[in-house]
């Protein structure tokens, strides 16, 4: 996807016709399904995002509901150089989780610089790390990413610290929306510890 | 539109949608859903979250409001006195040959029973957390660890879900709403224990898989701050799984057994302790759910040769501190602030990293209760159960009161004050004398510390302050008040043992996490290895920002050598286990590590900071 069509898909430039995938995505809130309390309280905004495969997804409906997940924030142009090491660390945890990955456990890595981190750029990054199914790199409209970041507490109440993006890349949120269990772990934790945390979420 | 209204409408809307099972298409048709973002639109066009989206933490009274409740309509409940198992008979426990180990089930075959086996089968790294791979209890006997102090008192306790009424004016009314607690009460029962009488508690985890919208059904119950072997300390690395139990052995010896022999040095006595969940990453949620209670420990009979010394739980003996029959005048007060949504449902700010504060301050599980008191002296044991608020206590009539213990440890002499600051996990024992008041007199305990978020108090004093608890002086008979406020209390042990190591620990925010010495907690790292019996000097630094950190060090208490390069306030000149580390503060403390071995943590007791992940582990070897 080039830059223009990427921005179009986010509604930043006018579109001639609505994207068919948008209409599809709107149907996804299925009948009779209730929102978890975390979703009700607004912690899990159902914002539209784009995956590194260029697919449009809704954060809550498509990525969180009925799943056990871990998600973190990063940027391709990582100012402190730590993002690649944390990606590698999470990949080791992915390997330890084996065939549960992509079945009931999913990893999501969301960019903090959505304007420059297009799906194409995310795809290149993911390919560099041999990222396998069950792990998505995500971008979206800046205001949606901002809402997601803040609602998940990847924010600092001091505006100066908040403006330093490297202050938001050290931690991953993990949880099981069905059982309403939400915690956080350092992305620098030993991969075996990240993997064993998932035992807590389904017991 | 006011935030309060937006929040109310949004919550109502969500409930309606959930109830009706509306589809996205229905919502779009009704104009309740934004086609662009998929966010729900309340009438004003704002979502609930948008009301506080500029800051990830909702400010009570600004972004979120609890329903109004009338003050002083509920009488303060006494903490339930914990009883031993029937006839104090350990036969119910099936603990094998009395060695502290359950029957020797093979690891890997457990479907229930002792969580220690499951803990180590699933997380082999924990197997090495205790000094003894067989996970036996130090201090029980069998030649392991120190001494031979098998249990004399036997208790059993259950963590479970039940309905609790925080206030009858809440929309839930007298039916109450779900809470988690020990033995089905919040706070949990009050243990009254004694040095020289080791006790055993089997804690069953009966928590359901489905939580309260926060919390996790896995626990590790910490006895804050007993001189306890590490396997019974309630280390956050241990897990007591739902459907299982964990056996705790409390030898109830004073620190200094190896130095002094017998049951240690009575000048090291603790007094007001509390127990609470310490599950890694989930402590704040589980404690907020209600998993905490108190434990008093009294001196061993005859601990001091001088008959005028000793805290015996008997106001005719030793220092004669207020007690009465059945501890009537020795009263635990547990303070715990909570937030409710406008519909009166429990609210916990799941993703707020600064901390969780609420606009309703509960005492022993009730909002603004009253307590009838008799015309005599009372000993109140004040506990700040958290999760993140610091109090500053005053009486509305300005009357002074007597502080006799800080963090449960009796001071060398009582200190007369008009107010005290109390951070999370700190305990203060105070004596209040109501004998001077006419029956019908009402005295209100006020919190005057202004705090608008989890960072810590602003430093402003509220006037008049939040009304928390009302005492009403009665004309009821009470016999004779035989209690005293002695001129001197427990002597401080000498701290002349040479320091073998100095260490510095800096608590700060970095990389969006809470860190100690630049690093978030890592389960595999032991940050200090300390020989048993040694003394160390630690420098504790608040690394900046306007955050306050109540730092708690497990195991032995510390003594301040200096606080901000000065002598600490008079009430802090004894032994403490919580450091009220104000913004930019620095202190030097003296620490000893005697008797038992194993892993113990040091962490911030703003439990939200602890969970994310302001903690280190040290190991006594």
Image (spheres, coloured by chain):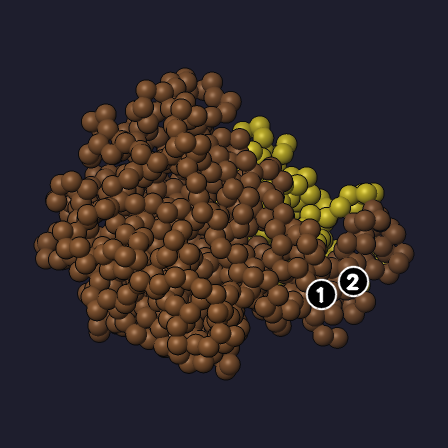
Chain colours: A yellow, B brown
User: Mark 1 — residue?
Assistant: B7
Indicate whether B156 appears above or below B92: below
On-image quarter of the N terminus of chain B: bottom right
Viewport quadrant of the C terminus of chain B: top left
**Which chain contains the residue that carries disc 2?**
B
Label 1, label 2: how far apart the Cα atoms are: 12 Å
**Quarter location, residue A153:** bottom right
Picture coordinates of residue B297, whole percent (x, y): 32, 49
- Badge 1: few (under 14), some or many (20 or more) residues near its Cα, within 10 Å? many
Residue that protrudes farthest toward the right in the picture: B29
Q: Is residue A22 visible?
A: no
**For discs 1 and 2, the disc positioned in front in the rendered view:** 1
Q: In this view, does B619 lie to the left or right of B158?
A: left
Under tag 2, what secondary structure?
A: loop
Query: Secondary structure beneath disc 1?
Result: helix
Point 22% across, 74% down: residue: B566
Q: Residue B75, position in %: x, y?
A: 56, 61
């Amino acid at each position: 996807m080039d830059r223009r069509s990427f921005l179009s898909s986010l509604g930043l430039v006018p579109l001639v016709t609505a994207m068919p995938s948008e209409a599809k995505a709107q149907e996804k809130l299925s009948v009779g399904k209730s929102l978890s309390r975390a979703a009700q309280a607004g912690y899990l905004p159902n914002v539209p995002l784009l995956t590194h495969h260029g697919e449009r997804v809704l954060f809550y409906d498509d990525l969180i509901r009925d799943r056990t997940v871990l998600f973190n924030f990063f940027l391709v142009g990582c100012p402190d150089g730590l993002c690649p090491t944390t990606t590698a660390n999470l990949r080791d945890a992915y390997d330890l989780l084996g065939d549960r990955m992509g079945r009931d456990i999913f990893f999501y890595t969301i960019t903090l610089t959505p304007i420059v981190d297009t799906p194409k750029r995310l795809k290149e990054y993911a390919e560099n790390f041999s990222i396998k199914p069950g792990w998505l790199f995500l971008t979206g409209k800046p205001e949606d990413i901002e809402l997601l970041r803040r609602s998940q507490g990847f924010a600092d109440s001091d505006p100066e610290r908040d403006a330093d993006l490297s202050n938001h890349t050290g931690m991953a949120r993990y949880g099981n929306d069905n059982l309403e269990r939400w915690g956080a772990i350092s992305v620098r934790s030993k991969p075996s510890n990240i993997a064993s945390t998932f035992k807590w979420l389904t017991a | 539109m006011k935030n309060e209204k937006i929040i109310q409408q949004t919550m109502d809307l969500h409930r309606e949608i959930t109830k009706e099972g509306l589809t996205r298409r229905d919502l779009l048709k009704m104009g309740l859903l934004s086609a662009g973002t998929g966010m729900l639109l309340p009438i004003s066009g704002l979502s609930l979250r948008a009301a506080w989206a500029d800051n990830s933490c909702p400010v009570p009274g600004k972004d979120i409001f609890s329903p109004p409740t009338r003050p002083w309509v509920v009488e303060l409940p006494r903490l339930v006195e914990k009883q031993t198992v029937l006839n104090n008979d350990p036969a119910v426990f099936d603990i094998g040959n009395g060695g502290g180990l359950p029957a020797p089930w093979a690891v890997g075959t457990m479907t229930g029973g002792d969580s220690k086996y499951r803990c180590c089968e699933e997380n082999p790294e924990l197997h090495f957390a205790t000094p003894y791979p067989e996970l036996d209890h130090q201090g029980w006997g069998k030649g392991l660890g120190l001494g031979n102090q098998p249990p004399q008192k036997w208790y059993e306790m259950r963590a479970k879900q039940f309905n609790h009424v925080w206030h009858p004016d809440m929309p839930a009314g007298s039916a109450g709403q779900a809470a988690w607690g020990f033995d089905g009460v919040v706070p949990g029962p009050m243990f009254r224990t004694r040095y020289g009488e080791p006790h055993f508690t089997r804690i069953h985890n009966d928590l359901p898989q489905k939580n309260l919208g926060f919390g996790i059904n896995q626990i590790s119950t910490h006895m804050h701050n007993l001189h306890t072997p590490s396997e019974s300390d309630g280390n956050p690395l241990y897990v007591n799984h739902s459907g299982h139990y964990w056996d705790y052995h409390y030898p109830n010896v004073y620190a200094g057994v190896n130095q002094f022999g017998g049951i240690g040095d009575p000048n090291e006595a603790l007094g007001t302790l509390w127990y609470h969940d310490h599950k890694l990453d989930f402590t704040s949620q589980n404690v907020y759910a209600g998993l905490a209670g108190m434990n008093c420990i009294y001196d061993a009979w005859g601990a001091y040769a001088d008959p005028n010394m000793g805290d015996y739980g008997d106001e005719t003996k030793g220092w004669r501190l207020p007690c009465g029959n059945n501890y009537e005048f020795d009263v635990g007060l547990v303070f715990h602030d909570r937030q409710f949504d406008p519909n009166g449902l429990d609210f916990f700010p799941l993703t707020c990293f600064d901390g969780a504060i609420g606009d309703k301050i509960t005492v022993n599980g009730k909002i603004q209760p009253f307590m009838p008191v008799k015309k005599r002296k009372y000993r109140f044991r004040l506990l700040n159960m958290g999760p993140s608020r610091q109090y500053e206590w005053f009486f509305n009539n300005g009357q002074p009161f007597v502080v006799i213990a800080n963090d449960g440890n009796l001071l060398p002499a009582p200190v007369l004050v008009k107010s005290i600051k109390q951070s999370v996990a700190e305990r203060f024992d105070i004596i209040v004398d109501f004998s001077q008041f006419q029956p019908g007199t009402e005295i209100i305990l006020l919190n005057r510390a202004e705090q608008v978020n989890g960072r810590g108090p602003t430093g402003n004093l509220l006037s008049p302050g939040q009304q928390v608890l009302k005492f009403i002086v009665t004309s009821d008979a009470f016999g004779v008040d035989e209690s005293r406020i002695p001129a001197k209390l427990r002597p401080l042990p000498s701290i002349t043992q040479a320091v073998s190591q100095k260490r510095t620990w800096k608590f700060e925010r970095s990389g969006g996490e809470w860190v100690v010495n630049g690093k978030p907690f890592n389960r595999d790292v032991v940050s200090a290895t300390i020989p048993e019996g040694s003394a160390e000097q630690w420098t504790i630094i608040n690394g900046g920002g306007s955050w306050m950190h109540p730092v708690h060090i497990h195991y032995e208490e510390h003594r301040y050598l200096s606080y901000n390069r000065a002598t600490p306030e008079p009430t802090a000149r004894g032994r403490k286990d919580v450091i009220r580390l104000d913004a930019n503060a620095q202190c030097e403390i003296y620490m000893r590590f005697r008797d038992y071995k194993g892993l113990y943590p040091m962490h911030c007791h703003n439990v939200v900071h602890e969970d994310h992940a302001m903690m280190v582990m040290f190991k006594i070897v």
